[in-house]
C-alpha cells in the first residue's frame, strides 16, 4: 500500500510569490491534515480536511489556504510568501477522526 | 498548536544506555501516540496507546498511557546509533483534535 505522497519535496520561492503544495493520502484515507514544522515552533496545525470539507483550522493567517478533492488528494496554498514561511510542511492522512495519522515525508519550502 | 509538555528537549547518550522521555498535559486525552522523525522525513508512528494504564512494547520501545490520562512516557532500552532522531508525543482528545509535544532530540554516541 503506497504511503502518503507529498510533492514537491523541495521548493525555493521568492518573497511575495505564492506556492501550492500537494498531498496524496493513503488509498482509502479520507482525512488529510497539514502541519507546519519549524525548529523553533515544532509542529503547528494548519488545517484538516475530510470528504472535501475543512473540518478544523489552526491559527494561521488567511494567506494559508487549502482544499481537498473528491479523490481525497489535498493541496495547500500560501500566497504572498514571507521569509518566516520557510518550513517543512507535513501532510498526514487517516481513515477518519479518532484514528492516528500517517505522515508524508514533507515539502521543504525555503523563501528567499 | 502545542499543548503538551514534552521533556527532555534533548538527550545525548552513549550507545547501550536506556532512554526515558515523557509528556504531560493539563488536559485529558483518549489516545496517546509516539512518533519518531528522522532528518528529512516525516514522523513515523512508533506506538499507539488507547487505554489509561496501558503499557505497550514495540521491540526495544515501551510506552505507557498514564492513569490520569494526562501523561505518557516512552522508554528505549539498550539504545543503538539508529535510534537517533526526534521523538514526538501526540495526544488526541474527545473532540479528536491532535496535539503534539515539542519533541525530544536524541543523539546516540557510538
Image (spheres, coloured by chain):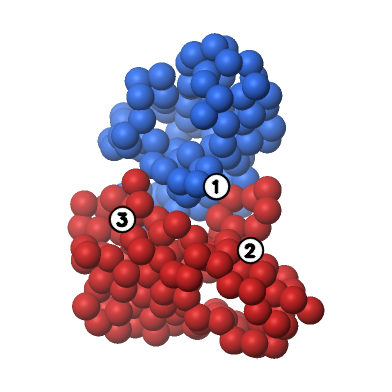
Chain colours: A blue, B red
Indicate the secondary structure of the residue bearing disc 3. loop
Residue B42 position within the rendered picture, expressed as x and y whole percent measured from the top left:
59, 50
Quick one: label 3, few (<14), some, or many (20+) residues within 10 Å?
Answer: some
Quick one: label 1, few (<14), some, or many (20+) residues within 10 Å?
Answer: few
The residue under the point 47% across, 75% down is B21
Q: Is residue A27 visible?
A: no
Front one among B49 and B68: B68
Q: Is residue B1 visible?
A: yes
Q: Which residue is mark 1?
A: A39
The residue under the point 69% across, 87% down is B16
- Say if labels 1 and 3 share a chain: no
Q: Which residue is mark 3?
A: B3
Give the image quarter of residue B13. Answer: bottom right
Residue A109 position within the rendered picture, expressed as x and y whole percent measured from the top left:
61, 30
Query: Is residue A46 toward the left or the right of residue B10 in the image?
Result: left
Q: Which residue is mark 2?
A: B85
Q: Quadrant of the C terminus of chain B?
A: bottom right
Q: Nearer the viewer, mark 1 or mark 2?
A: 1
Query: Is residue A98 toward the left or the right of residue A35 in the image?
Result: left
Q: Write down the chain letter for disc 1.
A: A
The Cα–Cα distance between marks 2 and 3, rounded to whole angstroms, is: 22 Å
Are the residues tagged 2 and 3 within 8 Å (C-beta)? no
Quick one: label 2, few (<14), some, or many (20+) residues within 10 Å?
Answer: some
Are the residues tagged 1 and 2 within 8 Å (C-beta)? no
Front one among B23 and A104: B23
Residue A13 position within the rendered picture, expressed as x and y whole percent measured from the top left:
64, 19
User: What label sits on residue B88 in the rendered view?
Assistant: none
Q: Write down the chain letter for disc 3.
A: B
The Cα–Cα distance between marks 1 and 3, rounded to whole angstroms, is: 17 Å
Are the residues tagged 1 and 3 within 8 Å (C-beta)? no
Up/down of B9 relative to A102, above or below:
below
- Say if labels 1 and 2 share a chain: no
Amino acid at each position: 500500500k503506497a504511503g502518503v505522497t507529498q510533492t514537491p519535496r523541495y521548493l525555493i520561492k521568492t518573497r511575495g510569490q505564492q506556492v501550492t503544495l500537494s498531498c496524496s493520502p493513503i488509498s482509502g484515507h479520507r482525512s488529510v491534515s497539514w502541519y507546519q514544522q519549524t525548529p523553533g515552533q515544532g509542529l503547528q496545525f494548519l488545517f484538516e480536511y475530510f470528504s472535501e470539507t475543512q473540518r478544523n483550522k489552526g491559527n494561521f493567517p488567511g494567506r494559508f489556504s487549502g482544499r481537498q478533492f473528491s479523490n481525497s488528494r489535498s493541496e495547500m496554498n500560501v500566497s504572498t510568501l514571507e521569509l518566516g514561511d520557510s518550513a517543512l510542511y507535513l501532510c498526514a492522512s487517516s481513515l477518519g477522526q479518532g484514528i492516528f495519522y500517517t505522515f508524508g515525508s514533507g515539502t521543504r519550502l525555503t523563501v528567499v | 498548536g502545542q499543548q503538551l509538555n514534552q521533556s527532555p528537549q534533548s538527550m545525548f547518550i552513549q550507545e547501550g544506555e536506556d532512554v526515558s522521555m515523557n509528556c504531560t498535559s493539563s488536559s485529558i486525552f483518549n489516545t496517546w501516540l509516539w512518533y519518531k522523525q528522522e532528518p528529512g522525513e516525516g514522523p513515523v508512528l512508533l506506538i499507539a496507546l488507547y487505554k489509561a494504564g496501558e503499557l505497550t512494547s514495540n521491540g526495544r520501545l515501551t510506552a505507557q498511557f498514564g492513569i490520569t490520562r494526562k501523561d505518557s512516557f516512552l522508554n528505549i532500552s539498550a539504545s543503538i546509533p539508529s535510534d537517533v532522531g526526534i521523538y514526538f508525543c501526540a495526544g488526541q482528545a474527545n473532540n479528536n483534535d491532535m496535539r503534539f509535544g515539542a519533541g525530544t532530540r536524541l543523539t546516540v554516541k557510538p
